[in-house]
Image: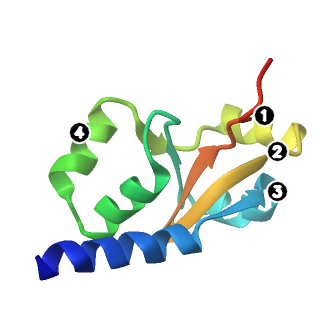
Amino acid sequence: MKEIRLQEVYRTKINQETSRIAWKELQRFYASGATILVSSELDLVEVAFQISEDNKLQVSEWLTAGKIGKVTDAQALSWYEADADVWAVVVSPYVLIQEVQDALKS
């Protein structure tokens, strides 16, 4: 029971460290190869938690399924040209990135 409460505390901490930020602010991390794109199908906080817990099996499954991976040059350029915002959270040495999904789509 204590283990579950600790995991929830860690998830809450990660959630509080997640923020919306301009992609242009993350260029130096992208240039150093430290940005990881997280599919919109996944919960950014959960991915960050699993990486922070070194859950190799889960991370490997996501990598194999193409649900997480390096930000591509094409994606980086697209976000840069659009002056896009992204969701981001640091799980050292990485910055996990997820596209901002508009809640109100017509």
Give the spatial CA distance, label 4 vs label 1.
Answer: 27 Å
Helix, strand or loop at label 4? It is helix
Whole-number angstrom distance, CA of label 2 to CA of label 1: 8 Å
Q: Are marks 2 and 1 in contact (CB under 8 Å)?
A: yes
* Disc with the residue nearer the chain's start (2 vs 1): 1
Dividing the picture into quadrants, the one containing residue 53 is bottom left
Separation (CA) of disc 3 from disc 1: 11 Å
Q: Amino acid at mark 3?
A: Lys
Residue 92 screen position, x and y as percent? 45, 74
Compared with residue 38, is residue 31 higher up or lower down, i.e. above or below? Answer: below
Q: Is residue 93 left or right of residue 18?
A: left
Residue sitting at x 56%, y 65%: 89
Residue hosting label 1: 78
Residues at circles 2 and 3 in contact by the CB criterion of under 8 Å: no
Determine whether label 3 and label 4 are within 8 Å by CB.
no
Q: Relative to residue 57, is residue 7 depicted above or below?
A: below
Q: Amino acid at mark 1?
A: Ser
Q: Which of the 4 image quadrants contains residue 52? A: bottom left
Marks 4 and 2 sit apart, C-alpha to C-alpha, by: 28 Å
What quarter of the picture does the N terminus occupy? bottom left
Front residue of 64/21: it is 21
Separation of residues labelled 3 and 4 (CA atoms)? 30 Å
Element assignment for label 3: helix
Along the line of sight, the residue nearer the viewer: 38 or 30: 38
Q: Amino acid at mark 4?
A: Glu
Which residue occupies 82% across, 44% down? Answer: 84
Residue 72 image position (x, y, % from top left): 60, 38
Q: Which mark is residue 24?
A: 3
Amino acid carrying mark 2 in the image: Ala
Residue of label 2: 84
Q: Earlier in the sequence, mark 4 or mark 2?
A: 4
Q: Nearer the viewer, mark 4 or mark 1?
A: 4
